[in-house]
Amino acid sequence: MKKEINLTGKIYTVVFLSGMFFYVIGIWLITPATNPSYIKYIGIGAMLVILFSIVLATIFRKSEKLDERARHNFYKASNLALLFTLFLLFLGGIILLAFPIRLTLLPGVISLALATIFAVHSLTFRTLELSGK
């Protein structure tokens, strides 16, 4: 018999670990190749398998139904994560206008930025749920 978990923990775990997927992919893209090339791929692959198994175990656990308060908190967290992203993009644009910086967006950097957005969303949702608002 599967143990029932609360929905807040389930959503928080799935969203946060989805961000960790992007984090691991960003680390994979940023780190240089190792001397035996398969060592890097074994380490990154093991991390992805562990994350994927935890997410699947969390998704398939029984949980309560989503109520209105949790749905509104999820929407608030999504809006705050979007505002955080737009603010950082706006701030980055101002910095690029003020200073002559040459910026190259690599896939690893974009993946790490996505991981940050997922982390902000999940932590905001968790904070809103725990505060009871």
Image (cartoon, grey):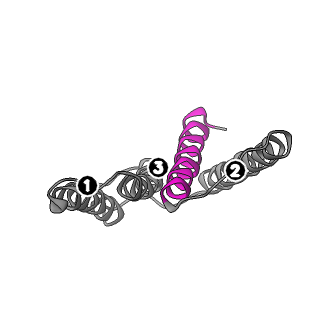
Q: Secondary structure at mark 3?
A: helix
Mark linked to residue 12 = 3
Between 23 and 3, the one lying in front of the other is 23
Q: Secondary structure at mark 2?
A: loop
Mark earlier in primary sequence (2, 1):
1
Picture coordinates of residue 17 (x, y %)? Answer: 40, 53
Rendered image quadrant of residue 71: bottom right
State the residue at coordinates (61%, 36%): 132
Mark earlier in primary sequence (3, 2):
3
State the residue at coordinates (28%, 56%): 33
Q: Residues within 10 Å of mark 1 (few under 14, many from 20)?
A: some
Q: Residues within 10 Å of mark 3 (few under 14, many from 20)?
A: many
The residue range painted magenta reads 108-132
Q: Assess whether residue 56 is covered by the magenta stretch.
A: no
In space, the residues marked 1 and 3 are separated at their CA atoms by 19 Å
Which residue position holds label 2?
102
In space, the residues marked 3 and 2 are separated at their CA atoms by 37 Å
Q: Mark 1 or mark 3: which is in front?
A: 1
Which residue position holds label 1?
47
Q: Mark 3 or mark 2: which is in front?
A: 2
Mark earlier in primary sequence (1, 3):
3
